[in-house]
Image (cartoon, grey):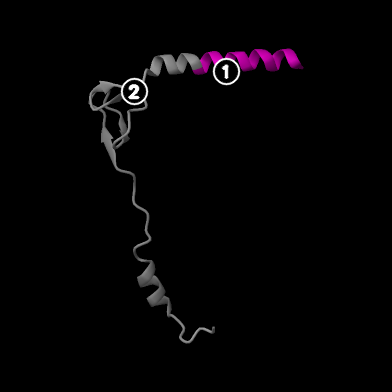
Amino acid sequence: MSVRMRHTRAHTGNRRSHHALTTARLSKCTKCGELHLRHRACLSCGSYRGKEVVDVVAKAEKKNKKSQARAKVAGGVK
């Protein structure tokens, strides 16, 4: 099937006018005051709607311990 009529740039632009991206909606954390995505737990303190739902300190310690173990293994392999 062939194209019967060519769409002008204006017609194409009018159609694409709704394709623009919007910025992320951010809210201020009630505990620490950091900005976070709406309906998500705060990444800095781990609270959601005033309650702590993620233990950020334990998560950071676990990540640090894991990275130290990787460094130890990588250092011994050389």
Task: Kindly identify the amino acid type of the residue bearing the numbered disc 2.
Answer: Gly
In magenta stretch: residue 44: no
Queried whether the magenta region covers residue 75, the answer comes back as: yes
Task: Tell me where residue 30 sits by quadrant.
Answer: top left
Q: How far across and down, in percent of the image, does residue 58 sit?
A: 42, 14
Q: Is residue 28 above or below residue 77?
A: below
* Up-down relation of residue 21 to residue 60 (above or below): below
25 over 13 or under it: above or below: above
Would you name the residue on which mark 1 appears? Answer: 67
- The residue that disc 2 covers is 46
Considering the numbered disc 2 on the image, is that residue within a helix, a strand or a loop? loop
User: Which residue appears farthest toward the right when viewing the image?
Assistant: 78
Q: Nearer the viewer, residue 37 or 10?
A: 37
Q: Give the left or right position of residue 72, taking residue 26 as reference.
A: right
Percent from the top left, x then y, of residue 36?
A: 32, 33
Magenta part of the chain: 63-78
Main SS of the magenta part reads helix
Q: Residue 43 sits in which quadrant? A: top left
| Residue in view at x 35 percent, y 72 percent | 14
Amino acid type assigned to the residue bearing label 1 in the image? Ser
Q: Residues within 10 Å of mark 2 (few under 14, many from 20)?
A: some
Dot placed on the residue nearer the N-terminal end, 2 or 1: 2
